[in-house]
Amino acid sequence: MRAPLTWLAEYTDLAAGARGVDVAASLVSVGLEEEDLHGGDITGPLVVGRVLEFEETIQKNGKPIRYCVVDVGQNGQMVTEGRHQEIVCGATNFEVGDLVVVVLPGATLPGGFHITARKTYGRMSNGMICAEDEIGIGHDHAGIIVLPRLLGEEHVADVKPGDDAIALLGLGEETIEANVTPDRGYCFSVRGLAREYWHSQGSPAGGFRDPALIETPQPNESGHPVVLRDEAPLDGVPGCDRFVARVVRGVDAAAPSPAWMQKRIAQMGMRPISLAVDVTNYVMLALGQPLHAYDLDTLGGPIVVRRARSGEKLTTLDDVERTLDPEDLLITDAGDGGEGGEGGEGGSETVLGLAGVMGGASSEVSATTTNVLIEAAHFDPTSVARTSRRHRLVSEASKRFERGVDPAIPAAAAEMAARLLVEHGGGQIDPGVTDLDHTSRPHAFRLELAEPSRIVGVDYPRERVLQVLRDLGAEVRETEDERYVEVTPPSWRPDLVNDSPAPDYAEEIARIDGYNNIPSITPTPTEGRGLTHGQKTRRVVADALAGAGFTEVLSYPFVAPELADQLMLPADDDRRRAVRLANPLSEERPLLRTSVLSSLVDVLRRNISRGQKDVALFEMGLVFRPGGPLGRAPLPSVAHRPSEAELEQLYAAVPAQPRRVGIIATGLAEQAGWWGSGRLVEWSDMVAAVEAVAAALVVPVVVSADADHAPWHPGRCARITLTDGTLVGHAGELHPKALSALDLPPRTVAAEIDVDVLTTASDRAVQAAPFSTFPAALTDIALLVRSDVPAGDVESALRRGAGESLESVTLFDVYEGDRIEAGHRSLAYRLTFRAADRTLTTDEVNGFRDAAVAEAARAVGAVQR
Amino acid sequence: MSGPNTNYDPVEVSALDPENVDAAVADALTAIAAAASLDDLKAVRIAHQGERSPLALANREIGALPPSAKAEAGKRVGQARGRVGAALATRQAELEAERDERILVEERVDVTMPVVRRPFGARHPIELVAQRLVDAFVGMGWEVAEGPELEAEWLNFDALNLGPDHPARQMQDTFFLDPVDSGLVLRTHTSPVQIRTMLREDPPIYIVAPGKVYRTDDLDATHTPVFHQIECLAVDKGLTMAHLRGAIDAFVKIMFGEGTRTRVRASYFPFTEPSMETDFVCFACHGDPGPDGCRTCGGSGWIELGGSGMVNRKVLQACGIDPDVYSGFAFGLGIERALMLRHGVQGMHEMVEGDVRFSRQFGMEV
C-alpha cells in the first residue's frame, strides 16, 4: 500500500522535515514493513515534448527505430539555432503531434540513471522519450507515455511543450510504500497508514484527522431498492451485512477528474480512467472502502445480493466470461420484473458483478453515463476470498474485503464519493439514501490489564495500557475490579475480535509502546538430553563417508515414472510403488523417489556433464514408501486435542519414509600421478564404503552375493545384512543396461543402505572385550575350493572350525590358473591365534588349524593344498 | 722369538726403542687422520692396531725384557697404544657422523610433490550450517526434533491455525499428493514438527527442528522447490516475548558472531500472536553502509532474519496444552538464506545442483 507524503499530511501531522525514508522508518517501528519509496528521485530537465516528425527505419536486429524531432519548448539545446531536439526512440506507440514526456541530458532518473547525449543507432540522441517504468510511475514498458492517454485529453488541453513534467506528474513528491500484513486490512488506506504514523509519533492529541468522520444523511425509504437475500451463508455468516446505495444524477459525462486527483491516483500506482471511476478509486484509497459505480440507466429494478445459481455466467470488467459457482456472492439487478422475479422469469434479471471482487461489463459506467449509482457495501471476507481464488481474480476490492474492511464507514465513503462527483462533474445527489445495515458492534472483551505484561515481558503500567487502548480507537470501560477493563475494539480492527484476544491486545500494546523496548532474556531449559542416538548415527554415517572420500550432495526427490524401467525394477518390486504429486512442478516428474539412488543419478549425470570425470557422491535423505494405496488423513477439529484414535489414524495415514544413504561413484578411485597410474572405482569400493560405515557404528555385517537385485550387476552385487539377516542394503557395480538407460558411464558403482536399520542395530552400549597380551601365533594355509564357492563362506567355516583362540583371518592370495584343477581356485589364508591366558604351543596351533581346515572341508568342500 | 734372556740389553731391542715407538704412533696418527672413509679407517685400524702392527709387535717384545726394564717399556708402549686407540675411536665417530649425515641428505625426497591419490570428501554446507545451529542450541539444553517430509495436511496447516481458507492451502504454494483428498502434502515448513512434539510430549518443551521443506516454486536465483528450514519451539510456564528475543539473539550470535545486535517489529503469522520480525545488524558493514552502500544488506545496515512469535493459543489448544497455564514461542529461518549470507553463496542453483565443487569448498565444518 502506498501513500504520498502530501496525502498522509492531510490526515496526520508529519514530523517537521520528515522525508520519505523517515516516514517509512516510523511506519516500520509500528510493524509496517517498508516495501519501497517512490518519487522525489528525478532531478534535472524532465519536460513535456511534442513529436514534430519522425523517420522510422528497421534495424538489422529487426527492431524498428524512430529518429524523432521533438519540440521541447525553451529547453531545447539547439533552440538558438532554430532546431528542435533530435531524439532516437525505440517505441512505436505514438504519432506525430503527440504530447510525450522527454528527459533531457543532465537529468537523473530513478535508480541513479544519468542521461547524456549519446550516439545510438547511428545518430545522436539528445535525451530520451520516457516510458512509465523509466520515471517510476508504473511498470509499463510496452511503449512510451503519450500524455493525453495517460492523463486524459482534457487535462492536457493547457499543457504545452517545455512544461515541467515533474510537477505535472507529481514526481517531485515522495510516496512511501508499506507492506501490509493480512491482519491489518485497514492499512490498505491512507486513513489507516496515517493512523499508524500517528501512533508511531506517540499518538499526540489532535494529531490524527479521520477522513471518514464526515456528516452523512439519514437513510430513508426513497433510495434505490436493495435486497440482501443470501440463502446460503458460508459458515452461517451472511455474505453481505451492509449495503449503502447513493444516486447522483445529471453528472457531466465528459467532465474529467481534477488533475490533483489523477496525480494522486497515479502516485498510488493506479491509472486514472474517468471521473466516476477515479472518484470511487480515490475514496477507496483514502478510506479503504471499495466502492462500485453503476450506470443507473442500465439498471432495471432493485439490486439483489444473492448467491449464484449453478450455471450462471458473468462477463467481468476484464472481459472474461466466468461460469459462476453457487458459493459466489453476486450483485444482481432484479430487472423490471422486480425482486420477486425468480430464475430469470422476469426476463431482464442481470448479474451485475461478483460481490466485492469485480463488476460486470454490462452496468459499467461509460463515456455517456450521467446518472450514477454508488455502491458502498460490506462483504464477508471468507466469501470474497473464496470467490477471488476460485476465479483467480484479485482486485483492489477483493484484496481489501478479504482482509476486512471497516463496516462503519460505507455511508461516509458513499457520501464522500457523491460529493466529489457533484463537485467535479456537476449534477445532484438524490435525497434517497439506501443503507441496509445488519452489522453489529463487536462484543466487549474483559481484559486483564496485567495480561499484556505477562505475554510481552515488559512491565506496562496500568495507565499506559489504558492510554494505548484508547489511542487505538478502542472503547475502554473501567470495571469495579480495577485489574480488569471492558474493551470494545474499534470498528476497523476485526482482527481484535476473537475468542481470546488478549495476545492480540498484547501485540498492540507492545507495538505502540515499541517492540524494541522488549528486553532479551536467554531462556534456560534444564532437562536437555543432547542428540538422540539416531541423530548421532546420521552424523557418524555422513562423516564416515565424507572421510572416505565421498562428497555429500542433495537432490530433488521428484522422479519420472520411466525411471523404474531404466532401473530395471521387476514388475512387482516395492520400489515401483511410488506416491504421486497432484500438482508436480513438471508433469514429467510427478513421483516421489522410493530410493535415494533414483535421484542421485541425476546429480552424478550433472557433474559428469560439467566435465567431472572422477566423481564419488553420497546423499542421505528420506525415501517415500507408501506400501499400498494412500489412505485418507483425517482433519479433526482444532478446538481441542484430537482423540487418540484420531491421532492414530492421522499418523497411520502418513506413508513410511525410511532414511537412506545412496552412494554412487565413477571414474578413478585413486588418481594417476608421478607415483604411477590410477585405479578405477570398482564394486569393492562400494562394499568397503558400507563396511566403513558399519565399522564406525560397530555394527557387524554379513556380505553375500545377490544375483538378482536391480539396478545392480547380477554378478557384482553384494547384499549386506546384519548378523540376524536384517537387510542393510546393497553395494556393487550397476547393471550395464541400467547404466546405458540412465546415460551414465560404464562401470559406475553404487550402494544404498538403510540408516534406520543401522541406527537400531547400533543403539546399545558397546561392551569392551578383554584382549590378550600373550604372543600371537601365525599359520598359513592354502585351500582349493570350487570357483563358485564364495570366499565369505570359506572364511565363515574357518572361523567356526578354528575355535575361540582365533584372532583374525586374512585372505592374502587368490589363485586361479593352470597349476590347479579347472573350475577351482586356491585361497590362501593367514590365521592368527592367540590365547587369553598363555602362550600357545605349536601343537595347539596346529590342532586349531587342522580343525579350521576340517570345517572348511566339511562346509564348502575345501581341500588343503 | 727366544726365551727369557737375563743378560739381554734393552738398548738392543730396537722395537722398544722410544724413538721407534714414537715413530709408530706418529705413523698411526697420520694414517688415521688421512682415513677418508670408514673403510679406510678399517684398514688403518688393522695396520696400526692389528696383531701385526708395529706397536703390537713391540708389546710382544716386552716379555723378553729383564724385569727391571719391563715397567718402563710397558708404560711407553701402553701409552702409545692408548693414543692410537683414542685417535681411532675419535675418527671412527667422526666418520660415522659424516656417513649418517650423508645418508639423511641422500635420502631426501621432494615433499612438495602432489601426494593425494584419493580425493577428499566433504559434507554439504546446508547440513553443516544446520549442525552448527543445532549444536549450539543443544549446548543450551534444547533438543532436536524431527518429522516426516510427506505430512498430513492437518499437522501442516489446520493445527497451526492455517484454516481451510488460508491462501497457502491453495495449489499455488503447496505440493498436494494424488489423490488430493488423501489429506497429505509435502510439508511447506518445519512447523508440523512443533505439532508432533506438542502432541507427544508434555511441557516444558525446548526443541530445535531442522529439515527439508517444499513449495511449488520453480528454481531461480532466490527460489527452490526444495529447501531447508530450522525452527525453534519453546513451551513452558512464564515464557514471554523477552525469552523469544533472547533465543533469537543467541541464534544470531551463533551464526554471525558475538555482539550482533537485533531489532524487532510487529508482524503477522497465523500460528503466532503476538508475532514478530527480526532484523540483525549487517555483519559486513556493521550497520554503517557508508556512502558507497553495502552489497550484503543493500545499504540499510540491517538484514532480515525471519518471523517469530508467541505460539497462538489456538495452536496450543489443538495440541491439548492449556494456554492459560503454558505459553510458548517459535521462530525459524531458511538455512539456504543463512548460508548465502554467512558464506557469500551467490544463488540457489549452487546449493541444489549437487556440483561436487560446491560442497568441497566447505570441507567438514563451517
Image: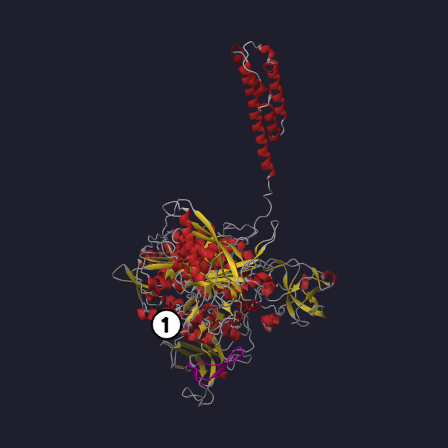
Q: Chain of mark 1?
A: A
- Whether residue A109 is situated above or below residue A631 in the rendered picture: above
Residue A318 in the image: state x and y as whole percent. Answer: 53, 77
* A52, B86: nearer the viewer: B86
* A154, B349: nearer the viewer: B349
Q: Would residue A3 be seen by someone viewing this image from the given angle? A: yes
The secondary structure type at the circle numbered 1 is loop
Local crowd at mark 1 within 10 Å, few (<14), some, or many (≥20)?
A: some
Task: Please say whether residue B343 is one of the residues in the magenta stretch.
Answer: no
Residue at the front extreme, as displayed: B3
Residue at the left extreme, as displayed: A480
Residue B298 in the image: state x and y as whole percent. Answer: 53, 55
Residue A542 in the image: state x and y as whole percent. Answer: 47, 56
Task: Please say whether residue A308 is one of the residues in the magenta stretch.
Answer: yes
Q: Is residue A40 left or right of A794 when viewed as pictured?
A: right
Which residue lies under the disc numbered 1?
A635
* A249, A580: nearer the viewer: A580
Q: Would residue B300 be seen by someone viewing this image from the given angle? A: no
At label 1, the amino acid type is Leu
**Magenta-colored span:** A301-325
The colour scheme is secondary structure
* A24, A430: nearer the viewer: A24
Question: Which quadrant: the N terminus of chain B?
Answer: top right
Q: Is residue A257 left or right of A431 when viewed as pictured?
A: right
